[in-house]
């Protein structure tokens, strides 16, 4: 996949955003993907956010679940994500921010690689966070108001930690790897610097 290359330095911290790109923020559950995207949206006027998790909620209401229970295993979800990216890019300008854990190499190739093959400028980002930090974050996050449901979500997310960390060793070439334990403002600045460098190559 032709992802942006991970640069090694920067001339300035605030890049001049002269074109729209897709920034896919990947990483384990609890790595801070949504928080980073919110920070990026504040910094990038006109930026749009596509959360494939919401498409997963739609798919769950329409088709039977896969044996695994993970909607990412449904081809219809993967098709919809890629189609949504294409449609948004066709009808709207501005940077598209996509926060989503996607660690199955074949799915990453199908969706992100598919966007790249269609000619889209995609920058794939991985937030690197140790297992112990992920566990602590997941246990303290409140994602839904109902305590029992929140506990089930936390248990599932915690169970995915090792699988996600194993995927770290198989990231596509050109992935921008960032330290997700740093303050979000610092992570956002580092990411924008890396994307700016990649655009100049």
Image (spheres, rainbow, N blue to C red):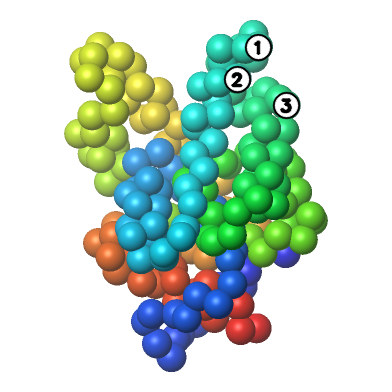
Other residues around mark 1 within 10 Å, as few (<14) / some (14–19) / many (≥20): few
Q: Which mark is residue 59?
A: 2
Task: Using the rendered view, name the quadrant where residue 150 is placed.
Answer: top left
Q: Quadrant of the N terminus?
A: bottom right
Name the residue located 66 percent from the left edge and 64 percent from the top edge. Answer: 121
Disc 3 element: helix
Other residues around mark 3 within 10 Å, as few (<14) / some (14–19) / many (≥20): few
Location of residue 54 with respect to 113 vertically, above or below: above
Residue 41 appears in view: yes
In the picture, measured across the screen, residue 134 lies left or right of residue 119, that is: left
Residue 108: x and y, percent? 66, 45
In the picture, measured across the screen, residue 186 lies left or right of residue 57, that is: left
Disc 1 element: loop
Residue at mark 1 to residue at mark 3: CA–CA distance? 11 Å
Residue highlighted by disc 3: 75
Name the residue located 54 percent from the left edge and 61 percent from the top edge. Answer: 94
Name the mark nearer the viewer: 1 or 3: 1
Other residues around mark 2 within 10 Å, as few (<14) / some (14–19) / many (≥20): some
Residue highlighted by disc 1: 63
Name the residue located 35 percent from the left edge and 52 percent from the top edge. Answer: 38
- Residue extending farthest to the bottom is 11
């Amino acid at each position: 996949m032709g992802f942006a290359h991970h640069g090694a330095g920067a001339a300035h911290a605030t890049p001049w955003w002269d074109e729209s790109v897709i920034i896919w923020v990947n990483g384990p559950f609890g790595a801070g993907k949504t928080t980073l995207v919110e920070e990026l949206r504040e910094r990038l006027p006109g930026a749009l956010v596509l959360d494939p998790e919401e498409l997963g909620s739609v798919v769950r209401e329409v088709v039977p679940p896969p044996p695994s229970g993970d909607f990412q295993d449904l081809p219809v979800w993967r098709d919809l994500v890629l189609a949504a990216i294409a449609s948004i890019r066709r009808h709207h300008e501005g940077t598209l921010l996509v926060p989503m854990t996607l660690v199955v190499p074949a799915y990453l190739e199908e969706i992100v690689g598919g966007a790249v093959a269609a000619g889209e400028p995609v920058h794939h980002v991985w937030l690197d966070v140790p297992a112990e930090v992920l566990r602590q974050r997941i246990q303290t996050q409140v994602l839904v108001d109902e305590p029992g449901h929140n506990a089930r979500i936390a248990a599932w997310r915690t169970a995915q930690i090792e699988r996600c960390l194993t995927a770290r060793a198989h990231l596509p070439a050109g992935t921008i790897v960032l330290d997700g334990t740093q303050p979000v403002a610092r992570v956002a600045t580092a990411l924008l610097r890396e994307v700016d460098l990649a655009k100049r190559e």
